[in-house]
């Protein structure tokens, strides 16, 4: 059977320290965090001392683990490059696997992209609230705990992210929750969020960057599974009437197939050009549709028509309905809730395809069954098109070359 990890931020959101605390609770071992706190001042300038406290707290009647980092620092802000460099040195010192080093890099790249979008394309991104040493501890500490728990290669899910609401103060003044960086990360990664349910900031940029860099899929509900261990990470604030706790669940999926609920949207149009339909199909996919089909039909009075059919996650259907109504001009959309079954183990690998002596990156989608056997392998069409444009090679010729390379690489694993 297949192990999995489910992060559940739909009630109280996620911050870096909440996620780290939940992992420590799952392992019941804080020693690795104490060690990186001891070593970090060697790698990050301006850190005078770090104290790690590990305690049990109660949040609105729910018991949780809370790992707090108390710092004395000489600097008030740092660049992302400084934080990443210190993180990679720590990762090397702690003997992290390559996939977790890539995870750390991905988290900081996500934060950098969000900051550049918000503040402009500066030569080097400097951070205020995120520039503290505890950002390094949250990110690297999470990677270390995933390795300790042997969860780095498991399938990871997350429920939608609660972001809170209300007003808050930070270095640029008073803003509403979620913060600019948090919202930008959610937008970039198309991650589902939930406003409220309280007037506090529930999710932070670091927490959200960790989550979107880690999970394979967002789900509306926890998947069918046997839960083995649950970690509870307490937030900094005890909110009256609201358990400010992040749950993470380690368990075993009940099947190598997963059933998920989706929504099917349908509408008939008979007065729209093919160009307009093509534009809407592209927009629907950008807005989070799982698939879009356009089916020729015969409408009333014998008019040629099209049925536009959209498959989408439950959480996205209202937004996609608006696209159909506004961009196609249709007067109504049929909505059906259904479910689908698919393979769980899906991964994307990047290989090098050599053309005219130059190596080009090519993404490959691989689907495996519960015994690890490959049941499907498919190259990313957009990557092949890009290579064809850059090399002037015929597309069909490249597909033949790719097929040969994939068989050489993974043919012995095909089922």
Image: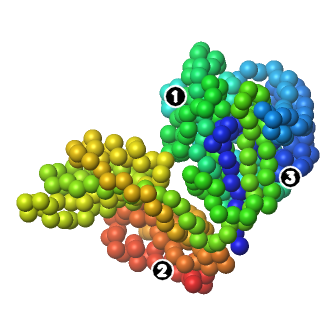
Which of pointers 3 and 1 lies earlier in the amino acid sequence?
3
Disc 2 is placed on an element classified as helix
Q: Quadrant of the N terminus?
A: bottom right
Label 3 vs label 2, nearer the camera: 3
- In depth, the one of 158 and 225 nearer the eye is 225
Assess whether mark 1 and mark 2 are in contact (beta carbons under 8 angstroms).
Answer: no
Q: Residues within 10 Å of mark 3 (few under 14, many from 20)?
A: some
Disc 1 is placed on an element classified as helix
Q: x%, y% of residue 157?
A: 63, 55
- Asked which quadrant contains residue 348, the reply is bottom right
Q: Residue 118 carries which label?
A: 1
- In depth, the one of 186 and 355 nearer the eye is 186
- In depth, the one of 124 and 383 nearer the eye is 383
The answer to whether residue 375 is visible is yes
Badge 3 is on which residue?
27
Assess whether mark 2 and mark 3 are in contact (beta carbons under 8 angstroms).
Answer: no
Q: Residues within 10 Å of mark 2 (few under 14, many from 20)?
A: few
The answer to whether residue 209 is visible is no
Residue found at x 84% / y 39%:
63
Q: Is 405 displayed left or right of 170 in the figure?
A: left
- In depth, the one of 161 and 185 nearer the eye is 161
Label 3 vs label 1, nearer the camera: 3
Residue found at x 56% / y 51%:
220
Which of pointers 3 and 2 lies earlier in the amino acid sequence?
3
Q: Is 87 displayed left or right of 79 in the figure?
A: right
Q: x%, y% of residue 144?
A: 80, 50
Assess whether mark 1 and mark 3 are in contact (beta carbons under 8 angstroms).
Answer: no
Badge 2 is on which residue?
404
Q: Residue 96 carries which label?
A: none
């Amino acid at each position: 059977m297949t192990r999995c990890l489910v992060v559940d931020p739909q009630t109280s959101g996620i911050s870096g320290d909440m996620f780290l605390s939940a992992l420590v609770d799952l392992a019941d071992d804080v020693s690795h965090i104490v060690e990186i706190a001891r070593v970090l001042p060697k790698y990050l300038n301006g850190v005078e001392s770090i104290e790690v406290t590990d305690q049990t707290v109660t949040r609105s009647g729910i018991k949780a683990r809370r790992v707090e980092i108390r710092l004395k620092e000489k600097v008030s802000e740092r660049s992302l490059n400084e934080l990443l460099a210190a993180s990679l040195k720590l990762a090397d010192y702690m003997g992290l696997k390559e996939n977790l080093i890539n995870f750390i890099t991905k988290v900081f790249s996500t934060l950098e992209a969000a900051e550049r979008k918000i503040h402009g394309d500066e030569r080097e991104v400097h951070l205020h609230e995120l520039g503290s040493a505890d950002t390094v501890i949250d990110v690297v500490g999470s990677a270390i705990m995933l390795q300790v728990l042997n969860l780095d290669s498991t399938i990871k899910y997350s429920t939608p992210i609660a972001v809170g609401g209300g007003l808050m103060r930070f270095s640029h003044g008073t803003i509403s929750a979620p913060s600019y960086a948090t919202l930008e990360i959610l937008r970039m990664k198309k991650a589902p969020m939930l406003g409220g349910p309280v007037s506090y900031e529930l999710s932070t940029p670091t927490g959200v960057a960790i989550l979107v860099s880690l999970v394979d899929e967002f789900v509306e509900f926890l998947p069918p599974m046997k839960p083995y261990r649950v970690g509870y990470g307490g937030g900094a604030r005890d909110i009256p009437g609201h358990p400010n706790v992040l749950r993470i669940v380690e368990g075993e999926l009940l099947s190598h197939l997963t059933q998920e609920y989706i929504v099917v949207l349908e509408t008939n149009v008979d007065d729209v050009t093919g160009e307009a339909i093509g534009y809407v199909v592209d927009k629907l996919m950008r807005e989070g549709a799982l698939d879009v089909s356009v089916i020729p039909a015969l409408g009333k009075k014998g008019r040629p028509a099209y049925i536009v059919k959209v498959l989408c996650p439950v959480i996205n259907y209202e937004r996609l309905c608006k696209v159909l109504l506004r961009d196609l001009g249709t007067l109504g959309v049929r909505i059906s809730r259904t479910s689908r079954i698919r393979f769980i183990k899906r991964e994307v690998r990047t290989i090098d395809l050599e053309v005219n002596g130059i190596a080009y990156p090519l993404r490959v989608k691989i689907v495996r069954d519960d015994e690890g056997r490959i049941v499907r392998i498919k190259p990313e069409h957009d990557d092949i098109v890009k290579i064809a444009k850059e090399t002037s090679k015929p597309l069909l010729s490249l597909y033949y070359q790719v097929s040969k390379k994939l068989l050489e690489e993974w043919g012995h694993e095909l089922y």
